[in-house]
Amino acid sequence: DPDLVVFTGDNIYGADSTDAAKSMDAAIAPAIAMNLPWAAGIGNHDQEGTLSREGVMQHLVGMKNTLSRFNPEGVEIDGFGNYNLEVGGVEGTLLANKSVLNMYFLDSGDYSTVPSIPGYGWIKASQEAWFRKTSSSLQKNYTSQQPSQKEPAPALAYFHIPLPEFSSFTASNFTGVKQEGISSPSINSGFFTTMVEAGDVKAAFIGHDHINDFCGKLTGIQLCYAGGFGYHAYGKAGWSRRARVVSVQLEKTESGEWQGVKSIKTWKRLDDQHLTTIDSEVLWNRGSNGRGGKDHDRS
């Protein structure tokens, strides 16, 4: 019973689809049938059928219960499906009108549009500028407007294609598995550095490489694959399809008032006989400065 479902792209395999809109409806249908709010971005295969990238995003934002947005209004920006969501504090508390958790969604493109650069697309300068501005304004609001908070609210980022930094890990310093190469763009457009400088993103979640499902921490940011979820594309025999669950806990004062985010945890749920849960871990704790530390549970 999740509060939100996020689809991180390649929601359909466009090339095999005779009607992309119909396929997309079928892919998202379970979330709609359960009346769950959901958000989506696009990958590099969604548009290979009867809809363009723009058409795919237009279709997604028109669907029932979606929180997806086409693009920020009045901003010239590359791609489609760049938007942010704000999770408000508990109603009736001092943080009711503040965003205690921010979520950024970015279009990581499909394939390079620069003839001299082969391979996959990347997050462009216009998107980084929008992210920086949005992050800065959300942080300012949280820490300076009353009731002002000591530290910015944590944030999560979602896009499809892995950043080159996903290649920074070995099996000794990640949780999960790496069973195929990391298909990032052949150039580094600097978005990881931009996230580090912004300071609020605690974890980034991607798709693209279906049989990788690891999380590794680099410079205070958890870089996480979810592992392949759908049956419409390649997987690995004997290796269950899976979804990553992210659970966010709030802090509670001694008097019982709910506050901002205390910790962010994750695990994967397998589509096997028992719907097994694996690889539970803490992604971030308030006060840990991104480097581990005690869980300040005052409840």
Image (tube, rainbow, N blue to C red):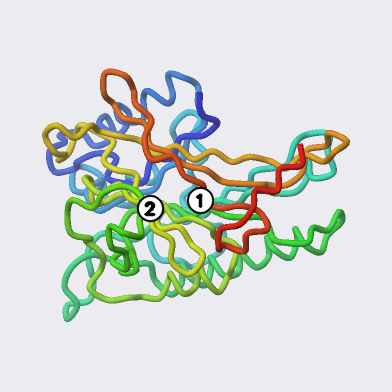
| x then y, percent, for residue 187 | 27, 76
Residue 37 seen in the figure: yes
Residue to which mark 2 is pinned: 215
| x then y, percent, for residue 28 | 36, 30
Neighbour tally class for label 2: few under 14, some 14-19, many 20 plus, Cα within 10 Å = many
**Total numbered circles:** 2
Which of the 4 image quarters holds residue 80?
A: bottom left
Q: Residue 72, which numbered label?
A: none
Which of the 4 image quarters holds residue 159?
A: bottom left
Neighbour tally class for label 1: few under 14, some 14-19, many 20 plus, Cα within 10 Å = many
Q: Is residue 39 above or below residue 291?
A: above
The residue at 52%/71% (across/down) is 196
Asked if marks 2 and 1 touch (Cβ < 8 Å), the reply is yes
The residue at 39%/58% (across/down) is 216
The residue at 19%/42% (across/down) is 14
Q: Is residue 114 above or below residue 1?
A: below
Measure the C-alpha gap from mark 2 to mark 1.
9 Å
Q: Is residue 268 left or right of residue 299?
A: left
Q: Amino acid at mark 1?
A: Leu
Q: Amino acid at mark 2?
A: Cys
The residue at 29%/40% (across/down) is 11
Q: Is residue 244 left or right of residue 48?
A: right
Quadrant including the C terminus:
top right
Residue to which mark 1 is pinned: 283
